[in-house]
């Protein structure tokens, strides 16, 4: 069983993990080429959406997910209680999918714990707050989702609510791809804020 000490060590280690390397930054969204496999996906029924109460964009994301009918769970950086009281008992019974918008540490821990239950990251987006007032979004997802991710470039300050709608369309069992969409937009009053990560973790469908 994972101990609290191991959680803290994992969180510290996560802060040292480099961000996605070699991402191409563009003023315009880059789009993957359509393929026969890019069919519409069935929405994933999330057990919980995790958000960090310290970050306004994360709170907005959670509020929109709640409006869409998904249960939400707030943390303040530390997801230990969430794991022991919610996710570990549930995943021991059934590996249900979850989503969230958090800092890197909670995602780092949850991703590795999910491996033991046959789950992987299906969607991942990095949201970088720049000193020039811009936000950069680096999105890794199934290409059917990436087509819609380009809309983040025109969402303005409403991007986190728009992202909730995007995440809610992630299909079951479809793994993320390499980073394929990078968008840049302005209207960020929180320059130099810690990078946020939005993500979906779910069971892998074996074909």
Image: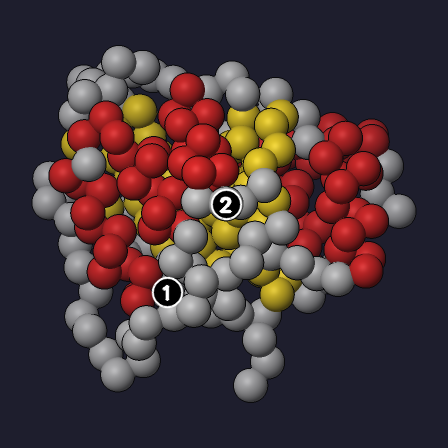
Residue at the (60%, 27%) spot, across then down? 74
Observer-nearest of 131 and 93: 93
Residue at the (82%, 49%) spot, across then down? 89
The outermost residue toward the right is: 1
Observer-nearest of 87 and 128: 87
Tell me if label 1 and label 2 are in contact, CB under 8 Å: no
* Disc 1 from disc 2: Cα separation: 23 Å
Going by the image, does 109 lie left or right of 182?
A: right
Q: Which residue is mark 2?
A: 69
| Element under disc 2 | loop
Quadrant in the rendering for residue 5? top right
Q: Which residue is mark 1?
A: 142
x and y percentages locating residue 179 in the rendered image: 33, 54
Q: State which tag comes first along the sequence, 1 or 2.
A: 2
Position of 106 relative to 204 (above/below): above
| Element under disc 1 | loop
Q: Quadrant of the C terminus?
A: bottom right
Quadrant in the rendering for residue 37? bottom left
Going by the image, does 28 lie left or right of 103?
A: left
Going by the image, does 152 lie left or right of 41?
A: left
x and y percentages locating residue 140 in the rendered image: 37, 54
**Residue 177 visible at all:** no
Q: Residues within 10 Å of mark 1 (few under 14, many from 20)?
A: many
**Residue 84 visible at all:** yes
x and y percentages locating residue 71 in the rendered image: 58, 41
Q: How is the image coloured?
A: secondary structure
Position of 192 relative to 43 (above/below): above
Position of 135 relative to 17 (above/below): above
Going by the image, does 43 lie left or right of 24?
A: right
x and y percentages locating residue 156 in the rendered image: 18, 30
């Amino acid at each position: 069983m994972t101990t609290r000490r191991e959680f803290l060590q994992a969180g510290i280690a996560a802060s040292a993990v480099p961000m996605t390397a070699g991402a191409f930054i563009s003023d315009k969204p880059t789009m993957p080429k359509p393929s026969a496999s890019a069919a519409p996906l069935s929405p994933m029924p999330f057990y919980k959406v995790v958000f960090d109460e310290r970050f306004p964009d994360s709170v907005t994301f959670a509020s929109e997910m709640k409006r869409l009918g998904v249960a939400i769970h707030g943390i303040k950086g530390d997801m230990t209680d969430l794991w022991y009281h919610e996710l570990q008992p549930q995943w021991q019974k059934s590996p249900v999918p979850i989503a969230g918008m958090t800092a890197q540490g909670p995602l780092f821990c949850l991703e590795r714990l999910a491996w033991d239950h046959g789950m992987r990251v299906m969607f991942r987006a990095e949201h970088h707050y720049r000193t020039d007032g811009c936000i950069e979004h680096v999105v890794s997802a199934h290409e059917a989702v990436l087509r819609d991710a380009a809309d983040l470039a025109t969402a303005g300050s409403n991007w986190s609510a728009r992202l909730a709608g995007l995440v809610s369309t992630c299909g079951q069992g479809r793994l993320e791809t390499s980073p394929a969409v990078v968008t840049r937009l302005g209207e960020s009053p929180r320059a130099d804020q810690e990078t946020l990560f939005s993500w979906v973790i779910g069971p892998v469908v074996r074909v």
